[in-house]
Amino acid sequence: METKENKIIEVPMGDTKEDIKARESIISDVYRSWYEANPSKAAYNSNLKDYINVRFLSINETVHHASMSYLSTLAVLQLDLILRNAIQVGKPQKPKPDNKNQSEFSQMLIMECQLVGIGTAKLTVGVKKKTGMKIQYCITAIST
């Protein structure tokens, strides 16, 4: 898989602890590069007509969930495209009451983005209770 810098990134396909750790590192590197290129830590989403902000929670959730799957890791390599082009599907959902990480949100938006060679990526966005700010919560690939 190639990135913008035309640097080849070998994403491990297996399910060993080593493969998952390697994918965690790749995802962290993607976010680090994205932060450097986007000092506002936000991307305008045309469907929501609002900015989706990327925060520490975004990185933690995505590293944990996306690293479990080869396709999800490939999806995260297209982070900027997903943030800008994902389309909301269905109605906003209530946060899961037993999930501490979702407690700061009033709603969870489920969004999807079609990615060539991967299929559908799912982007979960939390809407902050007090400010209404939209925070990227997690990105994963949807298995078909």
Image (tube, rainbow, N blue to C red):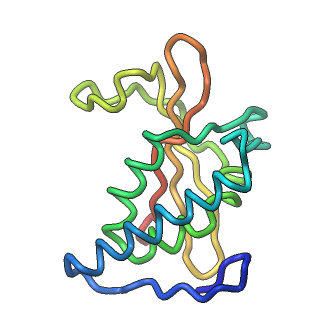
Looking at the rendered image, the quarter that the C terminus falls into is: bottom left
State left or right for residue 76 relative to residue 5.
left
Seen at 55% across and 34% down, the residue is 135
> Relative to the observer, which residue lies in front, 50 or 17?
17
Q: Quadrant of the N terminus?
A: bottom right
In this rendering, the answer to whether 72 lies above or below 55 is below
Up-down relation of residue 140 to residue 144 (above or below) = above
Q: Residue at x 60, y 30 (%)?
A: 134
- Counting from the top left corner in percent of width and height, residue 17 is at 20, 76
The residue closer to the viewer here, 32 or 77, is 32
Q: Closer to the camera, 32 or 125?
A: 32
Horizontal and vertical percent position of residue 50: 74, 32
Compared to residue 142, the image places residue 91 above or below, namely above
Tag count = 0
21 vs 35: above or below? below
In x, y percent, where is residue 97?
26, 24
What is the x, y in percent for residue 24?
A: 37, 66
Residue 30 appears in which quarter of the rendering? bottom right
Q: Is residue 48 left or right of residue 141?
A: right
Residue drawn at 52 percent across, 65 percent down: 29
Classify residue 55 as left or right of residue 44: left
Q: Residue at x 54, y 41 (%)?
A: 136
